[in-house]
Amino acid sequence: TSNMNCAVASGSSATDAAYLDAVNRGDMAAAQRMVDEAAKAAGYTEKAYHGTSKEFDVFKGYAFFFTRDRMTAEAFADLRGGKRVVQAYIKPGKSYKEDFKGGSWQDMEDKLEGLFSKYDSAEFENVWDRTGDTNQLIVWDSNRVKSADPVTRDDQGNVIPLSQRFNPESS
């Protein structure tokens, strides 16, 4: 990683400086620890996985489906003709929870429509879908989803400092 892409912005915190220093040194274990701590401190308390066949940097749309089980996300990506699994932090906010007791994913999706205006997220346990019996975590605001990767970069290739990365106003 080039030092040019890891410059510390004026006014950034000591945590940002330590994080960018770890990235510059290639110490991804230290960078990941700092990312985990920053996510938790900002309320992104759920680590989850999204299986997909698409390449993207920001979730766009109206509902984003995750699971806490990486193998389930891999199976879903495979069903979609892909191999990509996005590891993310979720800020659940006010969350609806229900044990679906083996109910279908179609029934779960039907139920979601009544939840959008009342909740920030929903968690359905024991949903039967094409990958088997799964637990689903769904959010409908992309600001509630942040990458769990040790390093994220902006459009110019610069490392995004933790103070900006976990700012709820950034996607």
Image: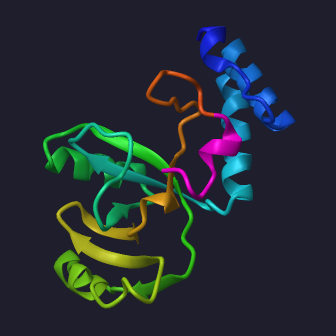
Q: Which residues are magenta?
A: 161-171
Image location of residue 82, percent across then percent down:
19, 39
Our reading of the magenta stretch's main secondary structure is loop
Is residue 48 toward the left or the right of residue 129 in the image?
A: right
Would residue 166 be counted in the magenta stretch? yes
Image location of residue 52, percent across then percent down:
25, 46
Is residue 80 positioned above or below 46 on the image?
A: above
Image location of residue 1, percent across then percent down:
59, 11
Is residue 15 positioned above or below 42 on the image?
A: above
Is residue 97 toward the left or the right of residue 5 in the image?
A: left
Residue at left offset 86%, top offset 34%? 14
Residue at left offset 27%, top offset 37%? 55
**Residue at the right extreme, as displayed:** 14
Is residue 106 positioned above or below 145 on the image?
A: below
**Residue at the front extreme, as displayed:** 10
Q: Quadrant of residue 33?
A: top right
Q: Quadrant of residue 138?
A: bottom left
Residue at left offset 42%, top offset 52%? 49
Colouring scheme applied when the structure was drawn: rainbow
Would residue 56 be counted in the magenta stretch? no
Task: Report the front residue among 93 and 28.
Answer: 93
Image location of residue 11, percent across then percent down:
81, 35
